[in-house]
Amino acid sequence: MDSELQRSISSRLNRRGERSIQIPHSKDVGGLFSSGKFSSDYPMKVIWKRGFVRLVLVAGIVWMLLILFALLVHVWSCQSSFAFFSAICNKESKVYNVLNVWGLVQPQHRCPIPVASDPDKIVIPDGKTPDTIVKNLTYVMEDEPAKDGSQTSPLFGGHQSWQQREESFKLSSSMKVHCGFVRGGGADMDPADVKYVKKCRFVVASGIFDGYDVPHQPSNISDRSKKLFCFLMVVDEVSLSFIRENATVREDSKGGKWVGIWRLILLKHPPYDEPRRNGKVPKILTHRLFPQAQYSIWIDGKMELIVDPLLMLERYLWRGKNTFAIAQHKHHRSIYEEADANKRRKRYARPLIDLHMKIYRYEGLEPWSMTKNTISDVPEGAVIIREHTAMSNLFSCLWFNEVNLLTPRDQLSFGYVVYRLGGSFKFFMFPNCEYNSLFVLHPHTREHSSKVEWVKSLNEFRGSGSSMKESRGGLGLWTPYPGDLDSIVLPQVVRTSKAG
């Protein structure tokens, strides 16, 4: 009995062990590898997984080799004797510009400026650049009375007619044009400041209006430049009061007002209702405000200059024998693109910007393309470097007249004036990355805003909204234009940048 009982227990244990061994196997068979797939699908999945990993590794290695190869080609091309390849490295070349337009090169936000190393070794050219096209330039100083007797007081920019505007673009050896500073139109300087600026041959100019900034002291200025340059900060009375409250203003024995290196130049009786339009007076008409200056560098009031001005003149004017230098806009090349961006960012009344652009389109201004002789139609106007020749001064006058007659957005008018002068005005438009390396940008003390910037239709200027209409600037937008603008369709704009 005992032996039979033991054999029974043993056989049961053996059957349980067999079942325990078979159960996992049966799960595998009924699960992932059921129906005979263990011998076919499993190896294929392993192969695909390993192949994908290998593909990723190979692609990464190939990509790194391509980058290394591109860098080697770039280094070689910069030293190459072949003009095409060496031009790839030259940011001023047409090859680089074409590649940039196609998106094949990505300019940096900031880049090293190829300035000379020592301001003390800069050789200042003797004399002035000779005037070859326009040799004698004079200005309209008296405002012409209106024929209907409706004119009440002189305007700073004068009552320029459409016919006078058209005649101002016809170049001749001797010319007389509107250029601001019409008698009785405002923007008057203190006698002490008038006397001081007469001695300024080299000028670094800036401006603050309506108290939006405080003066920022330039850095990296050599002792030679401190003696050579006049640093002139043009302000209105509102800004002067604001600066007195937020900075130390020192007054000398001759009535001059100073904040650090800056001499404050007070403009009494601002010529315009709009502070931004007032700011265009010293910015564009630097040669009129400081008539003794031969060279000037303009920087906006929110900027801190960090490059020696003498090195800037050598780099942007003397080295290339230029008389006018300005930076290329970071995002836009076409005026119509810039106008679209101004409307989106509410920089001025949208219907007035459209009217401005329709006038330019009617007068034949095409959107920028690579077929044009200029790198771009749109500049970064916050830094302007000039020699005050007759042609340079004429361009500044014509540029200002557009700002006075139409909208105060000067970037919309720059390329138009270049177009109207038909290639006679030569200028250097330097890379935007160099522009961003010239200064440190500081925020405004408060956000600028005016009612006119939010206007969405011309009807808002009428009736109760008539107070938004400027009374002394932009009068061309309200003067009947001698052409049919109703049929003008503005070019379609493709927005190339969210930031723009």
Image (cartoon, grey):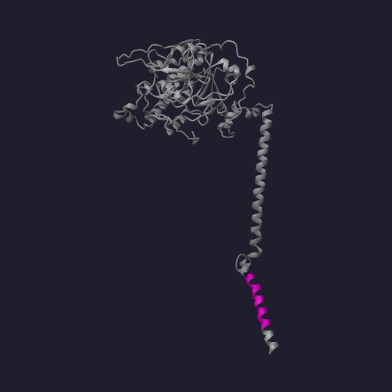
Q: Which span of residues is magenta-colored?
A: 9-26
Q: Would residue 10 be counted in the magenta stretch? A: yes
Query: Where 8 sits versus 480, above or below?
Result: below
Q: Is residue 78 visible?
A: yes
As rendered, which of 306 and 85 lies closer to the eye?
306
Can you see residue 321? no
Task: Residue at 58%, 21% (x, y): give it.
Answer: 221
Give the position of the N terminus as an image quadrant.
bottom right
Residue at point 64%, 74% (across, down): 20
Q: Nearer the viewer, residue 58 or 83?
A: 58
On the image, the x and y values in percent for residue 170 come to 46, 15
Quarter of the image where one finds residue 295: top right
Q: Position of residue 239 (x, y in %)?
A: 43, 23
Residue located farthest toward the bottom when viewing the structure as drawn: 1
Q: How many marks can you see?
A: 0
Snapshot quadrant of residue 73: top right
Residue 403: x, y in percent?
43, 22
Q: Is residue 447 magenta?
A: no
Question: Does the magenta stretch mainly form a helix, a strand or a loop?
Answer: helix
Give the residue drawn at x 34%, y 27%: 468
Between residue 144 and residue 134, name the one nearer to us: 144
Q: Is 48 situated above or below 214?
A: below
Q: Nearer the viewer, residue 250 or 13?
A: 250
Task: Answer with left or right where residue 449 lies relative to residue 73.
Answer: left
167 up-or-down from 353: above or below: above
Give how far across and how far down residue 4 sits, in percent.
Answer: 69, 87
